[in-house]
Amino acid sequence: MDLTLYPDFYAVCVFKKLICIFVIMETLIVEPQNKKQLNAIKAFLKALNVSFRREDESSANPSPSGDTWFLDPNNIAIVKKGIEEAKTGQGVILDDKLKKDLFG
């Protein structure tokens, strides 16, 4: 499977008709030089409906929605393993044919 065709989307962990889909996003670190730049950046992010937080407001939970599933280290290990499997070609792409095969 060529994941270069889908650089931001990986579907992995097919198990008993369960397919986990991982979307890989980036975290940007923005360093405004003054209050005016900070206010402009915040306004821009709000206009695009992009969530953001101050560095000192970050939590141990990597989920932007605060989903407690991600607080369990075993679940994080499953996600990391799935991402590594996808990078090495061991994952699958959830296309229409596979959806039909799995779910009818």
Image (tube, grey):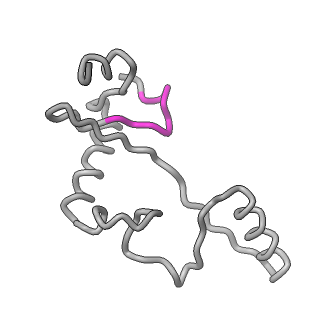
Could you tell me which residue is drawn at 67 percent across and 69 percent down? 30
Q: Is residue 12 left or right of residue 60?
A: left
Vertical arrangement, residue 68 with respect to residue 3, above or below: below
Q: Quadrant of residue 77?
A: bottom left
Q: Looking at the picture, does residue 83 appear above or below residue 28? A: above
Q: Toward which corner of the image does residue 74 lie, by quadrant?
A: bottom left
Picture residue at 45% right of the left edge, 63% below the top: 65
Residue 56 drawn at (x, y percent): 53, 84
The image quadrant that residue 37 belongs to is bottom right
Q: Position of residue 95 (x, y in %)?
A: 39, 22
On the rendered image, what quadrant is the N terminus found in?
A: top left
Q: Is residue 53 magenta?
A: no
Above or below, comparing residue 70 to residue 83 in the picture? below
Relative to 16, is 39 above or below? below
- Residue 6: within the magenta? yes
Q: Which residues are magenta?
A: 3-11
Task: Give left or right: position of 21 versus 5.
Answer: left
Farthest front residue in view: 104
Q: How many marks?
A: 0
Please provide percent x and percent y for residue 25: 51, 50
Between 49 and 61, the one nearer to me in the picture: 49
Going by the picture, which residue comes out furthest to the right? Answer: 36
Of the pair 4 and 38, the residue shown nearer to us: 38
* Quadrant into which the C terminus falls: top left
Viewer-proximal residue, 30 or 99?
A: 99
